[in-house]
Image (cartoon, grey):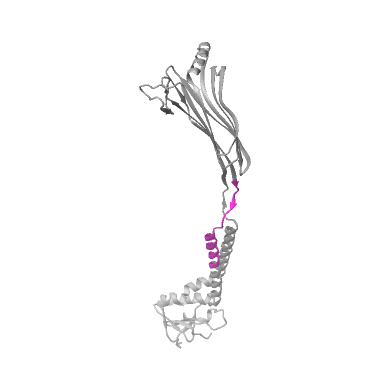
Amino acid sequence: MNVWVALQIACRRKEVVVALSLLAVVLFISAGYVYATPPTEPGTTTAVDRQAFRVSMTDSIVVTKGTQLYTSGHTLTGREAYFVQASETLRLHGRIEVPADQNVSVTYRFALNATATRNDQVVWQMEDVFADETRHVENGSIQENASLDVGRLSDRLARVERVVEPTATVEVRLVLVATYESDSTAGDPYRGTVRLTREFVMIDNAYWVEGKQTAVETEETVVERPAAPGDPDYVSVAMLGGGGLVAIVAAMWLDVLSRRLPSVAVLRHRANRQSYEEWISTGQFVYPEWSVFIELDSLDDIVNTAIDAGQRVIHDEEFGVYSVYSWPYVFVFFDHRVDRGDGSPPTGTDDGDDTADS
């Protein structure tokens, strides 16, 4: 291992181990929280047992008077206008449709309503009822046909108009109303009314029916499913838990590794030794008799002395001494000043294999 890396590990072992341990705890707690609090799926609304109730009204004539336009006996259906010269009898076809798979009771009324109104107030009214019945529907539909004598109706309304016009306005409507009660698989029976109104218009030589031909009412039961917890985010749980495991393993490895390293003092000395490599040579320490012996306190001091004197540092690995010769002085630094922390003599080499006497 690089001596500088080893020195950083030795110096910051406790801080790094504590930080990694705290990180592992935070990641494990986060993983547990993500697992224990999965996202909530929103509630849903579902319509069940939907039933449709429909009424429709169509119209037609059978040509009874041959003209240049139509052949006698020909049937005309849903025309924009019927001419009096072709036929004075309007056929009306009312149809009620209910769910065929349900038990349905229907009360219906098929009628012509004529009213004279002024300022939305009825001053006269008349009703001709084509059908007014209650039936239990078994096949899903009721067909009710009626015939309207247009000539006779025109005469009746003409007499009324002579009385009320221009004070009031006369209007004629064809109405089909059905009130139903149907069993429901979702609970209480469905009850309601569907109404269809079409306007009947007459002029001197023609007549017709205006308005939509169908009206529908739809019944349904709404079932609400409340919000429910969904599945945990297993990917996030795995990532957080895995990160916590990596952090705790790294903390344990770093703690074990740091305990096997030399002391901080020894590692710092080795780091300095490595950084001063270009100023140090390996050799044998010789103590000249003429010299003045000066012992320095650190490797930094003796390297700086060598630089100032223009000399090299001589490292005697056997005796663990660094020396600089600058007549009449011999400057020395002993490895035994470095506390190895393991009770053994210090060394002056990078690999720690050699020992030196103090």
Residue at image x 47%, y 75%?
3
Q: Residue furthest left?
A: 68
For residue 332, side relative to residue 35 (left or right): left
Q: Position of residue 271 (x, y in %)?
A: 47, 75
For the magenta stretch, what is the residue range? 224-246
- Could you say which is closer to the camera, residue 339 or residue 167? 167
Q: Position of residue 298 (x, y in %)?
A: 50, 76
- Could you say which is closer to the camera, residue 342 or residue 49? 49
Q: Position of residue 145 (x, y in %)?
A: 51, 29
Q: Residue furthest right?
A: 188
Q: Quadrant of residue 45?
A: top right
Residue at image x 57%, y 41%?
220
Q: Position of residue 65 (x, y in %)?
A: 41, 21
| Residue 300 can be seen in this image | no
Q: Quadrant of residue 249?
A: bottom right
Relative height, residue 233 to residue 115 (above, below): below
Residue at image x 49%, y 76%?
269
- Could you say which is closer to the camera, residue 329 or residue 88? 88
For residue 126, side relative to residue 318 (left or right): right
Relative height, residue 135 to residue 156 (above, below): below
Tell whether position 354 is magenta. no
- Could you say which is closer to the camera, residue 258 or residue 103? 103
| Residue 147 can be seen in this image | yes
Tell whether position 238 is magenta. yes
**Count of marks placed on residues:** 0
Relative height, residue 251 to residue 340 (above, below): above
Relative height, residue 142 to residue 206 (above, below): below
